[in-house]
Amino acid sequence: MKEKVVVVGGGIAGIQAALDLGDMGFEVHLVEKTPSIGGHMAQLDKTFPTNDCSLCILSPKMIMCADHANITIHTYSEIESISGKFPKFKVKIKEKARYIDLSRCTGCGDCAVKCPVKVPSEYEEGLAKRKAIYIPFPQAVPRKVTIDAANCRMITQKKCGVCKKVCQAGAIDFDQKDKFVDIDASAIVIATGFEMMDMSQVPQFGYGVCKDVVTSLQFERILSASGPTGGHLVRPSDGTEPKNLAFIQCVGSRDAKTHVYCSSVCCMYATKESILAGEHAPNIKTTIFYMDMRAVGKNFQEFVIRAKRNYGVRYVQSRPAKVQPAKEGKGAFVSYEQKGSGGDVASEEFDMVVLCPALVPSASSAQLSQSIGLKLDPDGFLATPDFQNPVDSNMKGIIVCGFSSTPMDIPDSVTQASSAAARVADLISGGAC
Amino acid sequence: MPRIGVFICHCGHNIASTVDVEKVAEFAKTLPNVVVAAHNMYSCSEEGLGAIRKSIEENKLDRVIVAACTPRTHEPLFRRNCERAGVNKYLFEFVNIREHVSWIHAKEPEAATEKAKMLVAMGVAKAALLEPQEESESSVIPVAVIIGGGISGLAAMSALVSQGIETHLIEKEKQLGGILKDIAVIGPEMKNTKELLDKMIKEIKCSPKAHFHLSSRMTDMQGFVGNFEVTITGDDKCSEKVKAGAIIVAIGGREWTPKGEFGFGKIPGIITQLELEKRLAKGDVPDNAVFIQCVGSRIPGRDFCSRFCCNASIKNALRIIEAKPNAQVTILHRDIMSYGTTAERVYRDAAEKGVRFMRYGLDSLPKIEKHGDGLSVEVFDETLDDVIGMSVDTIVLAVPMVPIENVKDVATQLKVPVDKLGFFLEAHVKLRPIEFATEGVFICGTARWPSQVSECIAQGLGAAAKASIPIREGKVKIEPITTSCNIGKCIACGNCVAACPYQAIEIIETDGKRHAFVTEAKCKGCGNCVAACNNDAMQQKGFTTTQLSAMIDALVKNAMEASQ
């Protein structure tokens, strides 16, 4: 009989861990809290430093997971409880009611067309609406609809039900209940990733006040061909193409008041987004305000040089103090200290400002830590105290990989996912001695 | 008659915003043997794949064409989809109308649509002549070979022997540990190196599956995934051959030697980071020191950042201050690369403990002069907008890690590529960072790119996971798109033998006739021999002369019709 392994988190780290473990012959249960696997990588337009289309390289891996004989995917699911200890964990997975019979749903989307309720789309970072019954993005795995109960009129008020009327497959089931699945797992891999910091912690940067101040993840969606603007680089206030653009690094990170650590990926994705902005709008003038340009990976320096040389990106080593609204609620003023000026503060107007906020451990990490006793490091990431085995948590048989252990980019997350698979196999085999 | 289905992908906006996909689908319907032609929003989505399978069934298709993106990422997916619908996966033909059409002709939608039509016509012509192929399996020798006994190789070995996999480790020196042997403390985590290495090596050695070949090098490698043969030659010139299923490359890097930068080699007291590590390990601590970052890196001609040097300097600055609390230590840098959580904390800690950080520019390099018994440093501080002078006894040049000198020999033996700097080139920089394109050969550690020690360990463990997959599975599938020799046409000139990078071809004699012979299990289907053959004797399955001629004929015919 195959040993079972539960992988928590269906982003790129969880996907790679599941694939490697599946290939190694384990029975893998991949648990993802949202309706589709893919994680943040699925939201990205391109990836640095090659500008490979993100979903184009991710989508085959997502489908390999779905097709893999050794992998079962539990989407829209959470860890209800974990008890026992290595090598006999009891994991209870809650498959939340999505009010859909997945075996019947064809993913045609007719129901979503007719659904009258519009809510901000999580996938589009609030820049577009989705329906209360929805498929988060076209390449979703599984490509099935989910009813968001909190916003469904039938579930909240017992009126509507139009989706059920139009569904030819008879897949809508308003009486569906949460389902619990028990797995006897030999080991657990945690890959719960990150989320954006709470932007209300950094009011000085004008987010929520100036319409044209967006987060980098929102900007990523604006650049994306499948995004809310159909791939046109336009600013939110008036839908026009920005002529000058600012990126502000280390928003809420490397800052003792919010998050002390460095999020590791922002310098490079800002460089990437600035190059992409230049491709969308060849005459755009882009400025990146940074503290240290941390281009430390393979071909990263060359990427920064390319941004400067080929796209005229201006890198300004200065930490802006504040961002204020410009005239008529369009654009914004960025105030920053000019280098070599003896402390003079410049205020420069930009059509659009992109904030690169601290990426923080996902809320699931803290929940798991509380419920089962996983230790956190001083920054709230899952602690990996054994230097010799950098993916082992403080609990034997529970392995941590990807951004949930410390900020890292996609190749490092993929590498750690493979390390996690190795550690699972090593522990189950009993080790060298 | 073949029954061909053609499926044109919108790829969201990627293709459809330039190429008129409906027109291409309509055109495809007019081509010979095409039974059905359709277009999909995302052919690779579950919905798109399902639609293709349904069409195969309903229209009894025996050939499938998808005109979409690149086979590099999506061919396995569509092939598998055909298999699921009962069509041999080698009867699938991929036409790339994204990279080859919509992306590069975005400003000429009409011409792009015409080009897409021609490519589809060529695909249809070829598909009609495709033949089903059967994949064969080959057994896997349950043994791994690791080249390099530094931290990455040891991490990989510990993971492999823990799984009970027989592992041979080749180390050119007589001791394990690699470059870490000279480094007493690992940053930024401040770990004791000796404790770590001793524990790891002790654990590995208690496994009967661990075999060490010290003072040895790999001198030859033959074979293919599952069935490699590695020749190991010791410094004593004795050789032995080890058969293995998988190989992990962990040959590490070396510290770049400065070419007189800042007076290195001429003025005493100017040393490299590794020399400082050696001195600190012996308790030889400078009274005061200046570190200069990015010496020989992030400069025109050697643009790359060596990733760990800032953390190494910060670590050593802290060690100096700890040993000599009154020491003056300054780090001259061009950006402090203390990415992540621990490194950033250690950086802050260093600043709080009195390590001075000053930024210099490439256009105002620090000036160093011999000054009495010591050294004087003058640097223009960009933040203070002023020239600052200081006197120290030691200047540490933080130089980058570069590939080892004979990296190209190792790469040639393994038939794997290196980049222009000499670092090994992984299969995909984003999603396959610890694999080579060559199956069964994996890469970890600083031979791929300079990395922190904790990252090297993670890469070693990861490479071990990858290497264990074919070994645990016990078998590998052999790609059937191989070449073969038409004996009747072959004149045994040997051009193909010379052209083959995999040593898969030899000249043999059958019934008195000399001719080329391809060992299919070694052939990777690169097609070099076909191109090298002057007599049309070498033929590659899936790319036969007949198939390629039919494609060209279809192009000429349809292009002429379109122009009339």
Image: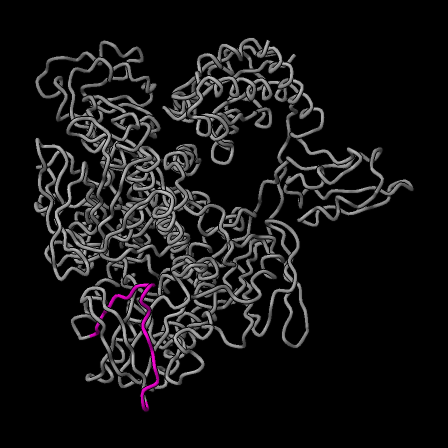
Tell me where residue A123 appears, x and y as whole percent.
Answer: 24, 32
Report the residue at 41% width, 58% height from top.
B304
Query: Residue B509 colored magenta?
Result: no
* Residue B177 in view, yes or no: no
Residue A2 location, quadrant? top left
Q: Quadrant of residue B397?
A: bottom left
Answer left or right for A41 relative to B30. left
Q: Residue at x 36, y 82 (%)?
A: B281
The answer to whether one can see residue B387 in this image is yes
Left or right of B265, for residue A176:
left
Determine if the magenta segment contains residue B360: yes
Quick check: A180 above or below B521? above
B112 and A45: which is toward the camera: B112
Residue extending farthest to the right is: B512
Q: Nearer the viewer, residue A61 or B8?
A: B8
Report the residue that reaches farthest toward the bottom.
B373
Per the rendered image, the range of residues in magenta is B355-373
Instruction: Identify the image's colour scheme: rainbow, by chain, secondary structure or one colour.
Output: one colour
Q: In the image, residue A371 lies at what x, y percent?
A: 17, 49
Location of residue B443 in the rendering, given as x and y in whole percent from the top left corner: 49, 56
How far across and down, in percent of the image, does residue A356 sit? 21, 46
- The quadrant of the rendering that contains the C terminus of chain A is bottom left
Question: Closer to the camera, B392 or A168?
Answer: B392
Residue at 12%, 47% (x, y): give it: A347
Side of A272 where B37 appears, left or right: right
Q: Quadrant of the N terminus of chain A?
A: top left
Picture layout, residue B327 above or below residue A348: below
